[in-house]
Amino acid sequence: MAPSPARTGSTRTRARGTRSTPPAAGAEVLADLHRRMVRIRRFEEAAGRLMEAGSIPGFLHLYVGQEAVAAGVIAHLSERDQITSTHRGHGHLVAKGGDLARMYAELFGRATGYCRGKGGSMHVCDLALGMLGANGIVGGGVPIAVGAGFADWYRGEGNVSVAFFGDGASNIGSFHEAANMAAALKLPVVLVCENNLYGEFTPQARHQAIRDVAARAGAYGMPGEVVDGMDAVAVWQAAGSAIARARAGEGPSMLEAKTYRYYDHQGVSGLRISYRSDEEVEEWKARDAIAAIEVRMMEGGVATREQVEAVHDEIRAEIDAAIALAEAAPFPTPDDLLDDVYTEPSR
Amino acid sequence: MSTTLEVPTDPVTARELPYLTAVNEALAQSMRADPDVFVAGEDIAAYGGVFGTHRGLLEEFGARRVVDTPISEAAIIGLATGAAVCGLRPVVDIMFMDFLGVAMDQIANQAAKLKYMFGGEATLPMTVTTWAGAGLSAAAQHSQSLEAWLCHVPGLKVAMPATPYDAKGLLVAAIRDDNPTFVVGNKLLLGATGPVPEELYEVPLGVARTARDGDALTIVALGRMVPEALAAAERMAADGIEVAVLDPRTLSPLDVDTIVSSVRATNRVLVVHEAVRFGGFGAEIAAQVQEHAFDHLDAPVARVGAPFAPVPFSPALEREYVPDSARIEAAARELVTRRLPGA
Ligand SMILES: Cc1ncc(C[n+]2csc(CCOP(=O)(O)OP(=O)(O)O)c2C)c(N)n1
Ligand SMILES: [Mg+2]
């Protein structure tokens, strides 16, 4: 079910204007996208292992396979630009420069975590970095990105907001209300659908009667574009134009990245019934975004194999250090329980 | 539906089943008994429900009667409402009770009120199954017990089964009932086992169960707090303090008479629920008790519930948050020592 190259980009529904050809990704961009993706991959692979080992309570929705989307979009954003995320939110925070030790600490439920142990995997956030939170409610973040986009518009400083959401989330009312409002108010918002072909265990064909979520953009009067979500450069290029459009005050856009999650909906393994074939999983893994960009970097002569491997080693060390720091962190105490319900101190 | 299904088997001698299987059996048997019953919800057909409640239904009843929906809670409740008005008997699932928030207009302004607003013209024989409860580190948006939201809306019925026997019987009763009825299960109870008769039977809505007799104190416990209250009562019995434990089973309509007559006998009452204490359903029970049994009370009505905070993620905090048998026991022991002034 991998999208054929011919299909990708087929639903450009640009409302108006023409766009110049996207800029080519130079060596620096490739290195940046690569590093962001490897950081996400390594973070998530380790999180999966730690969950299997019993260090992470609750739910864990891994982002592995979808790295090109977070990397390609977020590479255009500064910390003054806001994003909202989903239950599958680690990748967005890592790509935005999240502190890995604070992320692991949160996953472990420690007091030093991003949410002081109150949120866990599904609620990691970093407001200083412009990451307004993962979200436990499907579609819950999309209207919030519209509000953040409103604040950007209100202040007029050229910042933008990006909502990440899944194919499944594109069926919930909050998505539709938010898309319409963003367009009606012409807000600097980019709606990024990560279409990994499933909402939990239900394939897209059984949860909506369209192939391209981006086709919905036209109904709200905004441009929509489909991009190959396994190609970080393609995502980077498409996101670049949508974000530039928002920054220029021309209103919201929708971008749909066709992508795939390698692990189960939740956790690492533990499939009770098989809802997708091994062949399908392998077909997508064969198009792995990290492997692809590495080939591109090496064939383009912008990096040697040794340099690519050095990035992995460096990030592996960073991950190990972050885990060690998080593992040494204390748990919250009962005294913390009532803090943060309101702004007023609880004691 | 007019006739009530009797229980043909003595429940004590019935086979043991997990709560999960009891729910599944209620769905399957109700579907066999009535061709107008269908089930719908997210991942309930091909996957059998994320908790396994709907396993095997698609295979037996086919895709017309076992429907996977998009992630669209408002439309799921609307689907049930519209289909029920048109004479079907929908049983729809909202995976986590927290997601009721997404569907609240359809629940509270539409399904609950259509009959009344239409002067009685419409009938809505619809059931909503949903899954509440903390204790799984599922954090603030996947752990809540929101039964009080539903009980505050006239037109809805709300059941909260605590045992496999009641899970099956109350769900069957809800499906056969002609009003919008919520059956609020608890995720941590799904593995609990107990006797469940094989036949299709109803536990009538609005009838409380005495889970344990006692004379020193009445504990009224909801949902998963019933087994916790029973554990506390067992420990107190070892010290010769016999505590009665009542399970209302249905919160709306509430069996006030059973609660009041127990309190009249024990003169003390402790109300326990997993939901946030402030504004929780326990406040209604406390108010009913003082309205109907004030002169019989030897101590103020006491309540155990969660503190006034969202459900925290970290096990270190969630442990402190969720009421348990130790907290119930402490409150119960305190209550039995209370003496009236001058007594
Ligand atoms: C309102 C709501 N309904 C249902 C769920 C349960 N749920 C969690 S993730 C998920 C699937 C989401 O699918 P999609 O948006 O495609 O994201 P993906 O998991 O594929 O990344 C569902 C149904 C939820 N969290 N919130
Ligand atoms: Mg998806």
Image (cartoon, grey):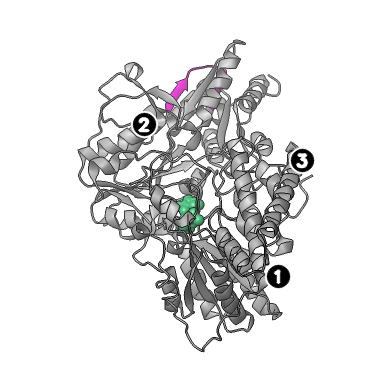
Q: Give the percent coordinates (x, y) of residue A217.
A: 45, 75
Q: Quadrant of the N terminus of chain B?
A: top left
Residue B21 is tagged as 2
Q: Which residues are magenta?
A: B209-219
Q: Are marks 3 and 1 on the same chain?
A: yes
Please report the residue visible at 46 percent of the width from the left and 42 percent of the height from the top: B131
Circle 2 packing at 10 Å, graded few (<14), some (14-19), many (20+), is many
Q: CA distance from mark 3 to mark 1?
A: 29 Å
Q: Identify the amino acid type marked 3.
A: Ala
List the residue tagged with mark 1.
A78
List the residue tagged with mark 3.
A329
Give above or below for B213 relative to B54. Answer: above
Q: Secondary structure at mark 2?
A: helix
Q: Identify the amino acid type marked 2.
A: Thr
Q: In the image, is B117 to the left or to the right of A102?
A: left
Q: Secondary structure at mark 3?
A: loop
